[in-house]
């Protein structure tokens, strides 16, 4: 059963800092107002006047990722009554757009200059446009009204700002008609769309704030109220003083030094300067424990783990595991049982406790633990049964035998281990 004392190796810290370097900023979607048709003024003749046009249309090609779009118009008796710049649709919408678009309440504040005469505006597709201009044998219009979309069509309007929220992709035609039989009119028109675009914001994402916290937390073996205060201080201080792009510009050594400086300042700011040295000593000791395990110096590993426990750190699993390999089974059972009371959900500790029961001839207690957890999964996809088999093999490699190893393997249905006690 591997050691579980909370610590990060240097490699883990480097990987974490590298991850933050490349994944620190926030990706988001932002709405932006773009102009489709610049403000322009045109003239429409009345139905009965000879010369000039009674109808005109404009092609509307919507930009990609259009969320909604608008057209604004007003009518006048003469060309100079309402200048093209008087609509200001793009400017007005740009002030109101947010992450959801433009609300109905906000739209009420968008104005178009008051018109003089009425006109008809039709939002059409290509077939509707053909109907709009189709004439009969007598030279008159074949259709009084073309096929059009109700959402964007207005009749007998003098002025207005028209929202289109359903028809947000493709090509459309906006046709205007003067319905008067005697009076021509000047019409001023502007068209704008709200478009959604992906943007990278130079601020820390919530995910990476958590990763920063985990990084600072790795400097503590004991996680308590004091360590939480220091880590929260470090995260808040860092994200308020450096942007993700500034962080990214630092090299690996500069990033580590920057984080170390932030953490040092927070020991003082939170009033916990006294725990810095003790934590550093404990981390040094815990790294020595890992080195002892790799070197199979289980006696040193056990002594150092017990020293950590006496200092108030949770190293019960480490102590128990190393004591098992020194064949001090009763002493291992004592520490593992105490650790299980403090952290009953810890599967690694429960596994080692089962081993201690087995090696101290408490077979029924061991059997219950092995069977109660047989369907569990540990870290990185390791199953409980795989863990038990690996641990038994490690014990046997160090000359630790039990007549019950094969019996437990059989109960857990671990295959391929006949006469494994002879390995």
Image (spheres, helix red, strand yellow):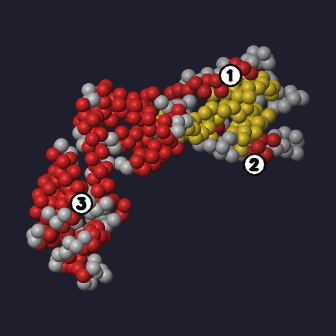
Name the residue rendered at 84%, 31% in the picture.
Answer: 53
What's the CA distance linking mark 1 and mark 3? 83 Å
Q: Nearer the viewer, residue 374 or 288?
A: 288
Quadrant for residue 208, please give it.
top left
For marks 1 and 2, give the one nearer the viewer. 1
Q: Quadrant of the N terminus?
A: bottom left
What's the CA distance linking mark 2 and mark 3? 86 Å
Quadrant for residue 384, please give it.
bottom left
Mark 1 or mark 3, earlier in chain: 1
Report which residue position mark 3 lands on: 298
Name the residue rendered at 67%, 22% in the picture.
Answer: 88
Report which residue position mark 1 lands on: 87
For marks 1 and 3, give the one nearer the viewer. 3
Dot 2: what SS? helix
Name the residue rendered at 44%, 35% in the picture.
Answer: 257
What's the CA distance linking mark 1 and mark 2? 30 Å
Q: Quadrant of the C terminus?
A: bottom left
Dot 1: what SS? loop
Dot 3: what SS? helix
Residue 324, percent from left and from top: 19, 64
Quadrant for residue 245, please give it.
top right
Q: Which mark is residue 360?
A: none
Residue 102, percent from left and from top: 55, 32
For marks 2 and 3, give the one nearer the viewer. 3
Report which residue position mark 2 lands on: 127
User: Is residue 385 found left or right of 380 in the rendered image?
Assistant: left
Asked if the residue at tag 3 contacts the one at tag 1, i.e. Cβ–Cβ closer than 8 Å, the answer is no
Q: Residue furthest bottom?
A: 418
Mark 2 or mark 3, earlier in chain: 2
Q: Is residue 406 above or below residue 254?
A: below
How many numbered discs sit on the rendered protein?
Answer: 3
Residue 285 is at least partly visible in this image: yes
């Amino acid at each position: 059963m591997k050691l579980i004392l909370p610590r990060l190796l240097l490699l883990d810290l480097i990987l974490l800092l590298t991850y933050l370097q490349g994944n620190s900023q926030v990706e988001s979607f932002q709405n932006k107002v773009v102009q489709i048709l610049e403000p322009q003024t045109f003239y429409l003749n009345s139905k009965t006047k000879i010369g000039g046009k009674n109808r005109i249309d404009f092609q509307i090609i919507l930009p990609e990722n259009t969320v909604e779009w608008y057209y604004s118009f007003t009518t006048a008796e003469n060309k100079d009554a309402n200048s093209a710049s008087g609509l200001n649709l793009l400017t007005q919408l740009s002030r109101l757009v947010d992450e959801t678009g433009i609300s109905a309440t906000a739209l009420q504040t968008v104005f178009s200059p008051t018109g003089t005469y009425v006109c008809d505006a039709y939002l059409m597709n290509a077939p509707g446009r053909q109907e709009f201009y189709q004439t009969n044998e007598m030279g008159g219009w074949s259709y009084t009204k073309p096929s059009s979309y109700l959402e964007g069509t207005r009749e007998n309007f003098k002025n207005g700002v028209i929202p289109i929220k359903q028809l947000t992709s493709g090509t459309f035609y906006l046709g205007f008609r003067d319905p008067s039989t005697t009076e021509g009119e000047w019409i001023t028109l502007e068209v704008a769309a709200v478009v959604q675009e992906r943007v990278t914001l130079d601020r820390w994402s919530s995910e990476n704030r958590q990763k920063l916290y985990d990084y600072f937390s790795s400097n503590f073996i004991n996680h308590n109220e004091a360590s939480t205060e220091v880590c929260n201080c470090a995260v808040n201080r860092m994200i308020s003083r450096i942007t993700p792009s500034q962080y990214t510009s630092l090299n690996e050594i500069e990033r580590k030094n920057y984080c170390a400086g932030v953490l040092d300042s927070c020991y003082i700011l939170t009033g916990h300067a006294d725990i810095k040295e003790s934590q550093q000593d404990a981390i040094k000791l815990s790294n020595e424990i890992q080195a002892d395990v790799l070197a199979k110096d289980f006696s040193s590993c056990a002594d150092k783990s017990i020293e950590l426990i006496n200092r108030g750190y949770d190293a019960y699993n480490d102590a128990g595991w190393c004591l098992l390999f020194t064949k001090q089974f009763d002493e291992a059972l004592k520490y593992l049982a105490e650790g299980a009371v403090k952290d009953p959900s810890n599967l690694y500790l429960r596994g080692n406790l089962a081993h201690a029961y087995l090696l101290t001839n408490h077979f029924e207690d061991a059997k219950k633990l092995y069977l109660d957890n047989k369907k569990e999964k540990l870290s990185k996809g390791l199953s409980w049964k795989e863990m038990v088999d690996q641990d038994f093999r490690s014990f046997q490699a160090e000359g630790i035998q039990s007549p019950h190893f094969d019996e437990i393997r059989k109960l857990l249905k671990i295959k391929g281990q006949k006469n494994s006690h002879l390995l």
